[in-house]
Image (tube, rainbow, N blue to C red):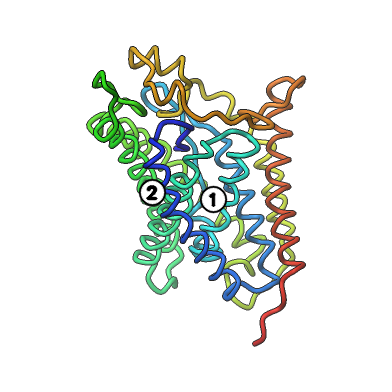
Amino acid sequence: MHIPENYLSPATCAVMAAAAVPVIAVAVKKVRSEVTRAKLPMLGVGAAFSFLLMMLNLPLPGGTTGHAVGGTLIAILLGPWSAALSVSTALIIQAFLFGDGGILSLGANIFNIAFILPFVGYAVYKLISGDGKSKGREYAAVAVGSWFGLNAAALFTAVEFGLQPLLFKGADGLPLYCPYPLSVAIPAMMIPHMLVAGVAEALFTVLIVAYIRKVSPGDIYEGERKRPKGLYALVVALIAAVPLGLLAAGTAWGEWGAEEIGELAGYVPAGLAGGFEFSAIMPDYTISGLPEIPGYILSAIFGAAITIVLFRLIAGLAKEKKS
């Protein structure tokens, strides 16, 4: 679901960046005014959850891959604006350090994955859960909300892909960027996400919410406080599981390299072939000189640690809100 570099036109990237900036600005403002200093580190844990879930690639119908995100999970636990900030942080780290998602398309990825996903998922969750007194109804709301959130983000991504050949063509009439129109992009993105990735998102969210209810209910129920050791244990478990993401063969739809899209489409769009290039420190979660699996695990540790330490530093600098 991460839009790579040069699949969107510079104009589209500018529009999506303009849409993402106020999302981040409002998220920062809301978190500063609504989240207590004691709870700020939980945004880092949430960002680590999201970062690690996005490394767990799943095989999807059609020979592509996809992943869960955890955006609705964070929205349920900490609120949708906290989720927007946490997932945005994970996406920024992925783009700049690991080359997962483009730099120019970062605004689009933040808008789709860090804004649309948690807000749609949380809205559906609240609509179904009602007063929250029925545990069965609430877990159903968690599952359905998560499924809708992920698929809403996939739909926005598909539309952005599909508009490119309609709006941006070269003198030869060929698309300059993503070559697949809406009639191809929407079903290609939506069918696998509806059938597999959305189900995985729902399952992960339900299991993690149930786990957190047991080990650290203070992060769900107001007034109940426990040390979140169980949450860090979950981060460690997810890090241990990330190599499973290497088992999924194929490339996520719309994330092919120039050579691969040339084979699929029969040509390489000019804007994609000669566009912006960025060299990440650990491209595709690899570390030079290390085998694939240890490199993937160390990338997971590094990425998760950055998110947790970052929000702990922010909490240390923040002033406690007056009651």
Residue furthest out toward the front: 171
The amino acid type, in three-letter code, at marker 2 is Val
Identity of the residue drawn at 57% across and 75% down: 34
For mark 1, what is the residue?
207
Can you say which quadrant of the picture contains the N terminus?
top left
Report the front residue among 109 and 307: 109
Please state the horizontal and vertical placement of residue 29, each as a whole percent of the image.
55, 70
For mark 2, what is the residue?
15
Please state the horizontal and vertical placement of residue 199, each as a whole percent of the image.
41, 42
Report the front residue among 220 and 96: 96
Identity of the residue drawn at 62% across and 39% down: 96
Is 16 placed above or below 226 here?
A: above
The amino acid type, in three-letter code, at marker 1 is Leu
Say which element carries label 2: helix
Q: Rate crowding at label 1 as few (under 14), some (14 to 19) or many (20 or more) other CA atoms within 10 Å.
A: some
Please state the horizontal and vertical placement of residue 187, each as a whole percent of the image.
27, 33
Q: How many marks?
A: 2
Say which element carries label 1: helix
Answer left or right for 133 relative to 293: left
Q: Of tags 1 and 2, which is closer to the observer?
A: 2
Please state the horizontal and vertical placement of residue 196, each as a whole percent of the image.
40, 36
Can you say which quadrant of the picture contains the C terminus?
bottom right
Identity of the residue drawn at 71% across and 53% down: 308
Is 34 placed above or below 212 here?
A: below
Report the front residue among 275 and 109: 275
> Based on the displayed image, in which of its 4 quarters is residue 181 positioned?
top left
Is 101 placed above or below 291 here?
A: below
